[in-house]
Image (cartoon, rainbow, N blue to C red):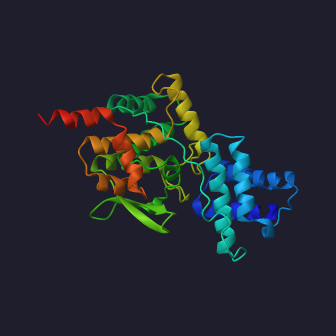
């Protein structure tokens, strides 16, 4: 089973454009399942991948981890099972009818317009070994503000994803859940930033849009983490801010401007409307404003 897991993770990482760090995490979680099988005296082979075994594994996880971690392990196992079914190695789904525990979502921390402006001003003047880094970082945050992409989607953007010559400027994002491309409109105000960045980027043959200044290759999670660390040292980001808070800010900004919730769902590319409604329900100041308008 270990060899199958290694092949699965390698193929999945390539198809989804995952970083080496994420691939390593998924592999480690799948190996946790194998280790648990051995600890129970069960041989880790596909014939023993049954609903009863999977339920027993979730019971084991519940006694060791909190709900979010259990969900991550469940998803890793589900991805592996889906891979086995897709390859014809499993005829039935042992996880059918078995659900991971729900985990309460936290109220999102929102970055204000002033905080955003301070961040953009800072990355333009921040000391860097190469001036290219400042242009890239500014374009990164400006584009992030008007697209609300996941950080992985931002880093996986390719030159061919930008439709700058079309009448309606847009970028294409691969939707793995639906196996299709989604097309997001680009705000006109960010086009000068993109043009400036492309000029600084020059004729680099890498297909990726955001590049590392020193290596001339794809900019990775490590670079974003280091940039976040510097912004937190400068007091421009609070310690509890994560990259996902920028996506949450995009969603809340749309809702606060009165954009229809279904249109927000389309721009966020949420599969379920409930994911979008979470940001409506957890915005008490905005709900209070609507109520005040009744009188």
Name the residue furthest right.
41
Between 287 and 154, the one lying in front of the other is 287
Between 122 and 131, the one lying in front of the other is 122
**Is there any visible trace of residue 163 in the rendered image?**
no
- The location of residue 137, given as percent across then percent down, is 47, 39
40 displayed left or right of 108: right
- Image mark count: 0
The residue sitting at 41% across, 42% down in the picture is: 248
The residue sitting at 37% across, 43% down in the picture is: 279
- The location of residue 210, given as percent across then percent down, is 51, 49
Of the 4 image quadrants, the one containing the N terminus is bottom right
266 displayed left or right of 136: left
267 displayed left or right of 34: left
Between 57 and 138, the one lying in front of the other is 57
Choose top left, top right, bottom left or bottom right for residue 256: top left
**Is there any visible trace of residue 8 in the rendered image?**
yes
Choose top left, top right, bottom left or bottom right for residue 5: bottom right
- The location of residue 214, given as percent across then percent down, is 60, 42
The residue sitting at 70% across, 56% down in the picture is: 55
- The location of residue 32, given as percent across then percent down, is 76, 50
180 displayed left or right of 58: left
Name the residue furthest left.
295
Of the 4 image quadrants, the one containing the C terminus is top left
């Amino acid at each position: 089973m270990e060899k199958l897991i290694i092949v699965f993770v390698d193929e999945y990482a390539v198809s989804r454009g995952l970083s080496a760090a994420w691939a390593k995490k998924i592999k480690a979680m799948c190996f946790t399942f194998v280790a648990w099988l051995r600890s129970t005296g069960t041989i880790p082979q596909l014939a023993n991948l049954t609903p009863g075994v999977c339920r027993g594994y979730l019971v084991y996880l519940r006694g060791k981890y909190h709900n979010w971690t259990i969900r991550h392990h469940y998803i890793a196992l589900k991805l592996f099972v889906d891979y086995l079914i897709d390859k014809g190695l499993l005829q039935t789904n042992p996880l059918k009818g078995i659900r991971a525990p729900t985990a309460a979502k936290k109220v999102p921390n929102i970055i204000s317009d002033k905080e955003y402006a301070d961040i953009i001003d800072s990355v333009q003047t921040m000391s860097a070994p190469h001036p290219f880094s400042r242009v890239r970082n500014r374009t990164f945050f400006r584009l992030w503000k008007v697209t609300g992409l996941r950080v992985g989607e931002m880093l996986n953007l390719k030159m061919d994803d930008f439709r700058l010559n079309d009448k309606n400027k847009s970028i294409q994002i691969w939707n793995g859940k639906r196996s299709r491309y989604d097309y997001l409109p680009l705000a006109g105000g960010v086009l000068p930033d993109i043009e400036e960045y492309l000029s600084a980027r020059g004729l680099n043959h890498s297909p990726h849009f955001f590049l590392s200044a020193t290596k001339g290759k794809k900019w990775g999670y490590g670079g974003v983490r280091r940039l976040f660390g510097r912004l937190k040292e400068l007091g421009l980001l609070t310690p509890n801010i994560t990259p996902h808070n920028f996506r949450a800010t995009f969603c809340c900004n749309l809702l606060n401007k009165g954009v229809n919730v279904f249109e927000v769902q389309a721009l966020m590319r949420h599969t379920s409307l409930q994911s979008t409604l979470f940001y409506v329900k957890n915005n008490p100041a905005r709900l209070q404003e609507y109520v005040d308008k009744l009188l």
